[in-house]
Amino acid sequence: MSHVAGAWVDGWVRVTRAPAILVGVVVLTMLGAIPFALTLRATLATHLGASQMAQQAAAGVNYDWWQEFQSQASGVGATFSPRIVGFAATLDSLSAIADTRRETTALIGLLAAYVVVWTALIGGIVDRYARQRPTRVHGFAAASGTFFLRFLRLGIVSVLAYGWLFGYLHPWLFDERIPALTRGLDSERAAFAWRAAGYAVFGALVVAANVVFDYAKIRMVVEDRRSALGGLAAGFRFVWRHTAAVAGLYAVNTLVFLGLVAAWALVAPRVPAAGPGMWAALLLGQGFIAARLAAKLHFLASQTSLFQARLAHAGYVASPVAAWPESPAVEAVAGGAPRL
């Protein structure tokens, strides 16, 4: 387990030594939400107008108006519900994943754009964490661009895998098999145990797929692999041969994330009144998002550290660091007249 503990600690070292990555990811996440926030603001302003209800909403939460708005809202406005406030938003996100609840079309577009942006950046992120030294903006951009199309091909495979898990296996398991197994049971406790077992099996398969795809990306970057299927096979081989270490690191990272969620549950504000309380709630919420993104980056950094430690790749990346081109005059002085 020494490799697991070392990778976990080293992961945080790598994250803290590249603060620009965390800051950039947080800023991009917040900027991505701004258009939807402005759209929702316009929708709320149109619905409230200059009515007395608007004054009550500005002073605090009016649940009667909130329910009235929810009954006729559509698009982004349909997402404005009590479950977006405080810890309820976290529980709602977990529930949506566990029960494969479909989001509104507007949010699907936002999630798709977020996945594309993350795909464009992850090559540079893993490259920086693997090298453990600054690559500067041009090096980061070059690595991101180099692996974007490769990861896009890998993303198609992941869409097929997760599509099968959530589109076929989940409905078959929870809408057909478990109801059939629990139909004649008299004990609610036994029925709950069957459903909990189903969630455990399904969750284990989702985690296994997530881990294999993560190590596929890491091997593609560190070893400069061009084939998405080759990288996926290499990621699977690494997970298969080092199952105990991979599972141990994933378990530790998951426990840390659950601890973060538990801390958020303790400090998450309820629906605040207008004024300083509302701004404090907003800052707390953004702080939790930043902490969650830091945990996500640490997942990648610690997994990269574990892979390099296990295969003696520490500090090694196959592809050279991209160098910013010098001016023609500097190149002429350094290496003679340029060839045409």
Image (cartoon, rainbow, N blue to C red):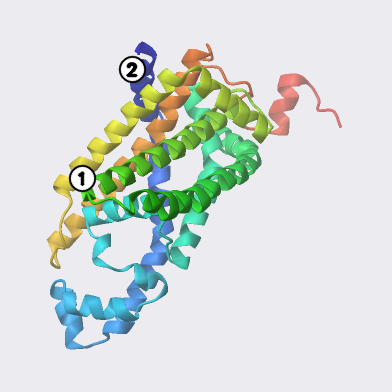
Give left or right: position of 129 versus 47.
right
Residue 181 pos. (x, y %): 37, 48
Residue 28 visible in rendering: yes
Give left or right: position of 23 versus 52.
right
Residue 14 pos. (x, y %): 40, 25
SS type, badge 2: helix
Q: Nearer the viewer, residue 31 or 86?
A: 86
Alpha carbon distance from label 1 to label 2: 25 Å
Dot 1 crowding, Cα within 10 Å, few <14, some 14–19, many 20+? some
Question: What residue does disc 2 label?
Answer: 5
Find residue 226 and report its image quarter: top right
Q: Nearer the viewer, residue 37 or 310?
A: 310
* Relative vertical location of residue 102 with respect to residue 26 in this rendering, above or below: below
For marks 1 and 2, the one nearer the N-term is 2
Q: For the residues labelled 1 and 2, say whether their Cβ atoms are less than 8 Å apart.
A: no
SS type, badge 1: helix
Residue 321 pos. (x, y %): 60, 26
Dot 2 crowding, Cα within 10 Å, few <14, some 14–19, many 20+? some
Residue at the image point whose x is 69% and y is 27% from the top: 330
Q: Quadrant of the C terminus?
A: top right
Q: Amino acid at mark 1?
A: Trp
Q: Quadrant of the N terminus?
A: top left
Give left or right: position of 5 versus 25.
left
Question: What residue does disc 1 label?
Answer: 264
Residue 227 pos. (x, y %): 69, 32
Residue 325 visible in rendering: no
